[in-house]
């Protein structure tokens, strides 16, 4: 296939080089953005008198025909035409003749690919936001569904203090809420229009960049043409957002895997969301959580890869920048699929309140409350800590828990203990007493659920804005 840039070449491109330099196998997914960008460009060229209205009409009709062909599966992408931009432009000229050759006036593939990728990222921010919003809803529903369930809270993966299961889930809600906010930052950075930068320095034609920005619903325009064609910050920001989101999902996965083990038995995953073993008939494995934890690695890898690609590049465009896409696209696909299966898995998960309660019966997670009891009777906290430490050591020796002790036994450790001690260290009291702002008491958790609901209402508005733009 003859090249759009063939003029100065005396030889054909080596087939191996064509394959090596081509990006069509992955950038063809931006065909809608490429066509929408070209239509906006053609309209602008005509209204600025750079091409005739008749040529613009031919170009626009031709591009719409190509769009229909691609959507119908009637378009064959050629490796020899390198990328999505030249595949479409070449086909346009075949369809409409000389007018097709005027489309690339006042434009370079450098600002064209930047435009396509900005539009693609902006659209995908909307898609990811929808799925993230749904996951947040699933987390919030899970938190609201079990308002009274108490579980051991952990530090160092050692039982620490009793907490509400809802409180634990809400911690994840707020992680995802921050992810949603970070996604808003990605949107802002993607919503800048690069077209008109030309190859690097702008163009000699009297173009109207504002018109193109309006046509394509961009909020801003790049101020500097070199920056416009070299900037990949919005991709890096997406990858950073995705890495943090996957890190959160991976942490939750780790807990889900632990909790669904026989040793914990805190939750039961739905059969539909687990897989079996080809040899061990009894197995029911939490593969979804494990794979999400595992896929976190590739997303981190894509972030590192892109940072590394960008770090040594002189201005302006360098072919290295073509390496921005595969990692971005794989990240988008990985994040979307992970969010989708995750929300479904959470909705199918049952909480085993009995196992959580049983765990609390055999531990010392009320020890802090016992120390606090003595403090409230006047003992300095350090001394109270020491007294309770001794009680714990005594119980361990006697194979007892703190609530098994008789009042006589309690009084041997401190005369401040009275009959109300058992009530003071029951798990319900421990949880209800942590009523400080943001604590685990039912009152606080109830208020937090209300806050989370109003967060969701605000996010719904952002979501409507992200998904409003249809190109
Ligand atoms: N396929 C290229 C990319 O993805 C498009 C831009 C090519 N520009 C160039 N001067 N070779 O980056």
Image (cartoon, grey):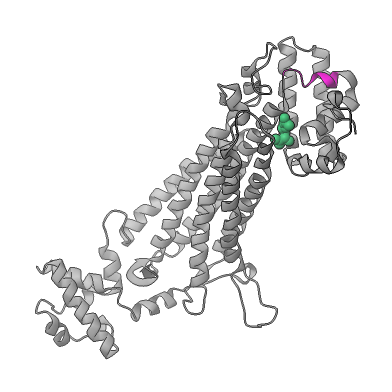
Is 272 displayed left or right of 53 in the figure?
Answer: left
Residue sitting at 52 percent across and 76 percent down?
261
What residue span does the magenta drawing correspond to?
A: 99-106
Q: How many marks?
A: 0
Task: Name the residue located 39 percent from the left edge and 78 percent from the top edge.
Answer: 359
| Viewer can see residue 120 | yes
What is the x, y in percent for residue 421? 18, 76
Relative placement, left or right, of 316 versus 1 is left
> Residue drawn at (83%, 24%), measured in percent from left and top?
61
Q: Position of residue 27 (x, y in %)?
A: 74, 40
Q: Nearer the viewer, residue 103 or 343?
A: 103
Q: Is residue 191 above or below residue 134?
A: above
Quadrant of the displayed image that contains ligand 1: top right
Q: Relative to residue 75, is residue 100 depicted above or below? A: above
Residue 302 horizontal/vertical position (percent)? 60, 49
141 to the left or right of 309: left
Q: Quadrant of the C terminus?
A: top right
Queried whether the magenta region covers residue 307, the answer comes back as no
Give the quadrant of the N terminus: top right
Picture quarter containing residue 110?
A: top right
Residue 118 spot, x, y in % from top left: 63, 33
Q: Is residue 440 left or right of residue 197?
A: left
């Amino acid at each position: 296939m003859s090249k759009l840039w063939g003029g100065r070449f005396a030889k054909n491109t080596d087939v191996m080089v064509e394959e090596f330099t081509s990006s069509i196998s992955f950038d063809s997914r931006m065909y809608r953005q490429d066509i929408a960008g070209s239509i906006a460009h053609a309209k602008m060229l005509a209204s600025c008198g750079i091409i005739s209205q008749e040529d613009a009409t031919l170009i626009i009709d031709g591009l719409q025909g190509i769009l229909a062909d691609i959507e119908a599966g009637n378009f064959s992408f050629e490796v020899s035409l390198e990328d999505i931009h030249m595949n479409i432009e070449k086909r346009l000229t075949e369809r409409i003749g000389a007018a097709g050759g005027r489309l690339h006036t006042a434009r370079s593939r450098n600002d064209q690919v930047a435009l396509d990728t900005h539009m693609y990222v902006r659209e995908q921010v909307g898609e990811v936001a929808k799925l993230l919003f749904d996951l947040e809803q699933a987390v919030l529903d899970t938190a609201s569904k079990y308002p009274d369930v108490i579980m051991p809270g952990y530090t160092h993966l050692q039982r620490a203090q009793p907490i509400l299961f809802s409180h634990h889930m809400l911690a994840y809600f707020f992680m995802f809420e921050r992810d949603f906010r970070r996604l808003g930052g990605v949107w802002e950075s993607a919503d800048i229009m690069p077209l008109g930068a030309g190859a690097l320095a702008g163009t000699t034609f009297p173009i109207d960049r504002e018109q193109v920005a309006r046509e394509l619903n961009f909020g801003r325009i790049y101020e500097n043409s070199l920056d416009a064609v070299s900037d990949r910050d919005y991709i890096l920001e997406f990858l950073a957002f995705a890495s943090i989101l996957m890190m959160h999902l991976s942490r939750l996965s780790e807990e889900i895997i632990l909790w669904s083990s026989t040793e914990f038995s805190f939750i039961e995953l739905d059969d539909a969301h687990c897989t079996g073993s080809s040899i061990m008939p009894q197995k029911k494995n939490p593969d979804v959580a494990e794979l999400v934890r595992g896929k976190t690695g590739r997303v981190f890898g894509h972030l590192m890869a892109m940072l590394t690609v960008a770090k040594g590049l002189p201005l302006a465009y360098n072919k290295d920048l073509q390496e921005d896409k595969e990692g971005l696209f794989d990240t988008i696909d990985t994040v979307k699929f992970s969010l989708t299966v995750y929300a479904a898995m959470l909705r199918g998960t049952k909480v085993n309140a009995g196992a959580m309660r049983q765990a609390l019966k055999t531990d010392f997670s009320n020890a802090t409350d016992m120390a606090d009891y003595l403090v409230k009777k006047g003992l300095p906290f350090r001394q109270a800590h020491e007294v309770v430490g001794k009680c714990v050591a005594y119980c361990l020796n006697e194979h007892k828990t703190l609530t098994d002790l008789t009042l006589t036994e309690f009084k041997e450790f401190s005369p401040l203990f009275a009959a109300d001690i058992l009530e003071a260290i029951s798990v319900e009291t421990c949880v209800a007493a942590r009523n400080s702002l943001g604590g685990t008491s039912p009152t606080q958790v109830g208020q937090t659920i209300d806050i989370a609901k109003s967060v969701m209402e605000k996010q719904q508005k952002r979501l409507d804005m992200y998904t409003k733009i249809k190109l």
